[in-house]
């Protein structure tokens, strides 16, 4: 029997693609292994977001090429294969096949047919089934591609225009995950709130949330949304996020900067003033609302006053979580030929200043929870055997976690997927430490291992 191993790099959207690659290969009779040295086929799902991510993807592919056994196939897929097909195949002779996601065939045909030195496409992964869940939370990708043209971003050039899944298909996938033990569903897309526009149905995200919320009786406890373009955060969506019992008030806003002139140069909507008004309005309605965003520092033409506008916005908006990234010049984007390069040393200095403003704000947001009773959705145990989980304030794999003070071997106290009310008694960096106050209130089906 042919065995395979999949290594995933990059963002949550890539993780969903990997899940579907795994499910597709299993359905076609291959068997999974967690040991790349024992696999007949080693698949690397790459990330092409910025130069550092591409470099890491290549390094991982080369490392796996070294450890795979003689005769095993190395298949490179994901965003780098999409974006640099021929170029990548030529630059990486170690790869037996370079596989995009935009063709017609099944991935097993490609994998079993390796070696193929020419890039080939496989069926769009969006509608493929996925394997049994490994955790009590799961990403669900509701659309692929993006209709925008942000000046710094190459994603639309290789992922294409947005293609939304039907609500029925998303609900079906979510129901299967919930029946398999998933208690938290994290909806992802390149531009989540744009969902449905390509099908002529703008504003479809709120109705989708209502549809998914109806899965609560089956065991769905939380729905979380990632990547909201700020101009699309309209009232019906905000209402759904604040009113539906399963949808958590966690606003992951894709802001990128605060200076209006620079945002126009980025070909993006908004200003620090508008973002702050939106955040204030939501906070006035829901004190427990949580805000996260990420920002690009050193975009071409970013002036000292643009940077000050960003620092001022951060100080005023008091986001719970924020990430800062140095601008990366990507081939084929509008920004790749823009003048006004910001020197590396200045970018580093500005990144440091952003952290200096934001770190105490995030720390204060965490400290404010000390003494509060929070609902912790148990994810499992960490390497030390401690029970860990998350409140609605922490997105999986992105923010901190909550460590529950229960005896070693905490899995006997609460299974993954249980909700444990607990009092926060300490903060450790981005993480919280908490003491359970009662027995778990809810137990969902055991997650398949
Ligand atoms: S919204 Fe902008 S940054 Fe996000 S994927 Fe689309 S083009 Fe890229």
Image: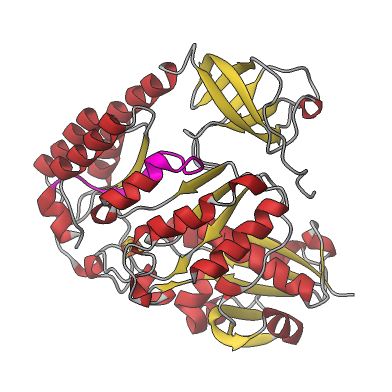
Relative to 159, residue 37 above or below? above
Rendering coords of residue 365 (x, y %): 38, 23
Q: Is residue 308 left or right of residue 38?
A: left
Residue 369: within the magenta?
no
Q: Is residue 164 left or right of residue 423?
A: left
Relative to 61, residue 186 above or below? above
In the picture, residue 340 is in which quadrant?
bottom left
Which residue is nearer to you in this view: 37 or 295?
295
Which residue is nearer to you in this view: 366 or 391?
391
Q: Quadrant of the N terminus?
A: bottom right
Residue 248: within the magenta?
yes
Which residue is nearer to you in this view: 223 or 21?
223
Report the magenta residues as a range.
Answer: 241-259
Q: Is residue 243 left or right of residue 267?
A: right
Q: Quadrant of ligand 1?
A: bottom left
In the picture, residue 200 is in which quadrant?
bottom left
Which residue is nearer to you in this view: 199 or 100?
199
- Residue farthest along the right direction in this orientation: 1
Visible in this render: residue 120?
no
Q: Give the residue displayed 73% in from the left and 53% down from the top.
A: 180
């Amino acid at each position: 029997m042919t065995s395979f191993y999949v290594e995933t790099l990059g963002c949550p959207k890539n993780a969903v693609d990997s899940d579907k690659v795994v499910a597709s290969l299993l359905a076609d009779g291959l068997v999974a292994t967690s040991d790349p040295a024992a696999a007949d086929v080693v698949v690397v799902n790459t990330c092409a977001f910025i130069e550092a991510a591409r470099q890491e993807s290549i390094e991982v592919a080369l490392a796996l090429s070294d450890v795979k056994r003689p005769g095993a196939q190395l298949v490179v897929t994901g965003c780098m294969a999409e974006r640099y097909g021929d170029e990548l195949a030529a630059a990486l002779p170690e790869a037996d096949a370079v596989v995009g996601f935009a063709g017609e065939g099944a991935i097993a045909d490609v994998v079993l047919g390796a070696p193929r030195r020419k890039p080939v496409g496989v069926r769009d992964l969006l509608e493929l089934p996925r394997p049994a869940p490994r955790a009590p939370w799961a990403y669900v990708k509701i659309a692929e591609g993006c209709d925008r043209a942000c000046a710094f971003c190459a994603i639309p050039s290789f992922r294409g225009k947005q293609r939304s899944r039907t609500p029925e298909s998303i609900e079906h996938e979510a129901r299967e995950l919930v029946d398999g033990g998933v208690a938290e569903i994290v909806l992802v897309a390149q531009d989540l709130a744009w969902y449905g526009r390509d099908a002529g149905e703008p504003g479809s995200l709120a109705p989708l949330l209502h549809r998914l919320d109806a899965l609560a009786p089956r065991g769905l406890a939380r729905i979380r949304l990632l990547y909201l373009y700020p101009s699309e955060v309209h009232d019906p969506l905000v209402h759904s996020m604040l009113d539906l019992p399963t949808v958590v008030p966690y606003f992951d806003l894709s802001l990128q900067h605060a200076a209006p002139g620079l945002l126009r140069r980025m070909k993006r909507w908004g200003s620090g003033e508008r973002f702050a008004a939106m955040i204030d309005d939501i906070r006035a309605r829901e004190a427990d609302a949580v805000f996260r965003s990420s920002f690009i520092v050193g975009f071409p033409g970013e002036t000292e006053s643009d940077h000050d506008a960003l620092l001022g916005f951060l100080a005023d908006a008091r986001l719970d979580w924020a990430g800062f990234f140095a601008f990366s010049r990507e081939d084929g984007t509008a920004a790749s030929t823009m003048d006004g390069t910001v020197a590396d040393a200045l970018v580093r200095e500005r990144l440091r200043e952003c952290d200096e403003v934001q770190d105490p704000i995030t720390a204060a947001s965490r400290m404010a929870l000390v003494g509060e009773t929070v609902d912790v959705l148990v994810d499992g145990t960490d390497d030390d055997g401690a029970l860990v989980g998350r409140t609605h304030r922490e997105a999986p794999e992105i923010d901190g976690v909550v460590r529950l003070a229960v005896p070693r071997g905490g899995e006997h106290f609460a299974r993954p997927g249980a909700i444990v009310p607990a009092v926060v008694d300490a903060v450790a960096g981005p993480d919280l430490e908490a003491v359970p106050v009662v027995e778990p209130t809810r137990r969902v089906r055991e997650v398949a291992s």
